[in-house]
């Protein structure tokens, strides 16, 4: 199945991905305060500062998992997809390899001619 590339969709997704952390931070702060004052303080019996520290520990743990496991896996997948589906760099590398192979063959042919000339001189 052939993939379809529409730049505008990628642009919107990238823009949303770039502003999402800011929106998420505001949302998480408001949600945490609401959850603490309406429910959590009645069950955990911790003060608000301890609750914020608990949230920070959870966020840092998730960030570490994301950085050390998820991101490398994501980039490995993206690199494989880019290589498989017509990446411009892949095409450039193929062209460079073909050009280098052509140059190597030309040098080999030149060396072969010189060797043949030397062998002919040695026989006469």
Image (cartoon, rainbow, N blue to C red):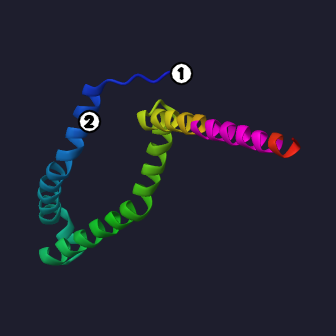
Residue 6 lies, with reference to residue 108, above or below; the image says: above
- Examine the image and state in which quarter residue 64 appears: bottom left
Image location (x, y in percent) of residue 63: 32, 64
Start-end of magenta stretch? 103-119
Tell me the crowding category of disc 1: few under 14, some 14 to 19, or many 20 or more residues within 10 angstroms, Cα based.
few
Image location (x, y in percent) of residue 42: 19, 70
Residue 38 lies, with reference to residue 121, above or below; the image says: below
Relative to the observer, which residue lies in front, 24 or 34?
24
For the point 62% across and 36% down, which residue is it?
Answer: 106
Residue 76 lies, with reference to residue 49, above or below; the image says: above
Q: Is residue 7 left or right of residue 53?
A: right
Q: Residue under circle 2?
A: 13
Q: Which mark is residue 77?
A: none
Magenta stretch mostly in which secondary structure? Answer: helix
Relative to the observer, which residue lies in front, 13 or 97?
97
| Distance from Cα at disc 1 to Cα at disc 2 | 23 Å
Q: Secondary structure at mark 1?
A: loop
For the point 13% across and 59% down, which residue is it?
Answer: 29
Q: Residue under circle 1?
A: 1
Q: Is residue 22 left or right of residue 86?
A: left
Image location (x, y in percent) of residue 124: 87, 41
Q: Is residue 26 magenta?
A: no
Tell me the crowding category of disc 2: few under 14, some 14 to 19, or many 20 or more residues within 10 angstroms, Cα based.
few
């Amino acid at each position: 199945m052939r993939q379809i590339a529409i730049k505008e969709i990628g642009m919107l997704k990238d823009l949303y991905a770039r502003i999402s952390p800011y929106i998420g931070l505001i949302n998480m702060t408001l949600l945490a305060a609401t959850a603490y004052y309406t429910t959590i303080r009645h069950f955990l019996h911790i003060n608000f500062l301890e609750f914020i520290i608990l949230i920070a520990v959870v966020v840092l743990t998730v960030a570490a998992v994301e950085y050390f496991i998820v991101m490398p896996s994501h980039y490995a997948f993206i690199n494989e997809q880019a290589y498989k589906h017509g990446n411009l760099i892949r095409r450039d590398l193929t062209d460079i390899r073909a050009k280098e192979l052509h140059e190597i063959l030309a040098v080999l042919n030149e060396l072969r001619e010189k060797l043949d000339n030397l062998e002919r001189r040695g026989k006469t």
